[in-house]
Amino acid sequence: MKYIDLFAGAGGLSEGFTRAGFQAIAHIEMNQDAAQTLKTRIAYWHLRKNGNLKPYYSYLKGKITHDKLYDNVPANVMNTVFTYKMNRDNLDEIFRLVDNNLYSQGNSERVQLIVGGPPCQAFSLAGRGKLRSIEELARKNGNDVAEDERKYMYIVYCSFLQRYKPDMFVFENVPGLLSMENGRHWNAILKMLRCVGYNIEFRELNARYFGVPQERKRIIIIGWRKDTPYFYPDFQATQSDWTVSDILADLPSLQSGEENNRYSKKEIKKYVTEHLRTDDDVLTWHIARPHNPRDREIYKIAIHEWIDKHKRLRYKDIPEHLRTHKNQNDFSDRFKVVAPDNPFCHTILAHISKDGHYFIHPDTKQARSLTVREAARIQSFPDSYFFEGSRTSAFTQIGNAVPPLMAERIAEALMEQLRKGNI
């Protein structure tokens, strides 16, 4: 079962679909660091399937470069990652690369699935060009290309559907997409997806019901070709028997600015052993941000407010000598503790890359924000998942990702249908 991952990011969706047994033909991502993360994860999966993770662990320990790591993987496997900012001028080139991968892998020259979460920001499609047929469809459905040159990335997504005609697709985005431009943009997306030949259904799904220790709502559109018997699967909610404290317990304590790559000797909780960590894993990205004394004092107050009173700290309740803003309304919810006694955390956002005030570790003795590894665990990324680039980039990749556990559940449900449909 072959798939293409569009706007792939750091690979949260791909991780889930790979685990479920799908084979990637292409991952397309414009960010260099995220694309490098994808390559490193592809190397991991290839080495794991061949029973030799030694080069991967050597890389995580800093003993070899990523080029040396990639030398252990066939070029045709590594070349499934394309670092492109997709637009009307380069789609033919991207299609050519994807076609080469598809035909070189033999067995079937068909793509069964396309997945991806197109970003909401506009991009220019001024004039006529490579996307002519898709633009004409957009015009028929109320989007005047000549009048409004700012079209959206969903048009690129639809171009892939039209070219490869997969049996099914998964289109992921934020709930705010429904109300964007008073719903006009959302309705245009739905019309376009139907016009290129698909029955569709969408639901707002929450990652916490898929076993992810996080409150994270997303709109998931699932589409299936009109000549197929497929449907939107029902998902049974996972019953949580863990807390956020369980998720973080075996990671070593850190002070502001410290790093520790050795696991704590504390008991490893069931959730961690089932989803996040193996005995062979190398701990990476467990590095605390440096914090100034004022912020650390505020963090301690915020932690005590939650632990002692189960209350969130409001800016107006911070002692005056610790405040840096006179505006108490806009900054009322600026500091937020990751609640240790809940089975799920509040949503991990890409904003965590800016500062850690909204994601405070719940231990007053540490009084710091989450590390990259802690944020990754809350997103359900396993400890073997390595994020390339700077700390800021790693946080951004995590905050923008689809949680792998959620993706895996969706992938398994679609795989079951596709297998039955191909008997």
Image (cartoon, grey):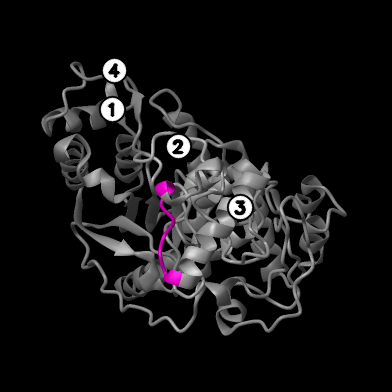
Callout 3 environment at 10 Å: few (<14), some (14 to 19), or many (20+)? some
Q: Earlier in the sequence, mark 2 or mark 3?
A: 2
Q: Which residue is mark 4?
A: 128
Check if residue 314 falls in the magenta segment.
yes
Which SS does the magenta portion mostly show?
Answer: loop
Residue identifier under label 2: 95
**Pointer 2 or 4: first along the chain:** 2
What's drawn in magenta, residue-wise? 309-316
Residue named by callout 1: 151
Residue at (51, 58) in percent of width and height: 302
Q: Secondary structure at mark 2?
A: helix
Q: Nearer the viewer, residue 55 or 422?
A: 55
Picture quadrant where residue 201 is located: bottom left
CB within 8 Å, label 3 to label 4: no
| Quadrant placement of the C terminus | bottom left
| Residue 310 picture location, percent across and down | 42, 69
Q: Disc 2 residue type?
A: Phe
Residue 138, given in percent of the width and then of the height, sits at 19, 31
Which is more foreground, mark 2 or mark 3?
3
Circle 3: residue type: Glu
Q: Position of residue 35 (x, y in %)?
A: 59, 43
Residue at which label 3 appears: 297
Packing grade of label 4 (10 A; few <14, some 14-19, many >=20) is: few
Horizontal arrangement in the rendering, residue 7 relative to residue 138 (left or right)? right
Residue 359, percent from left and from top: 52, 55
For marks 2 and 4, give the CA distance: 18 Å
Amino acid at dot 4: Arg
For marks 4 and 1 on the same chain, the one whose residue lies earlier in the sequence: 4
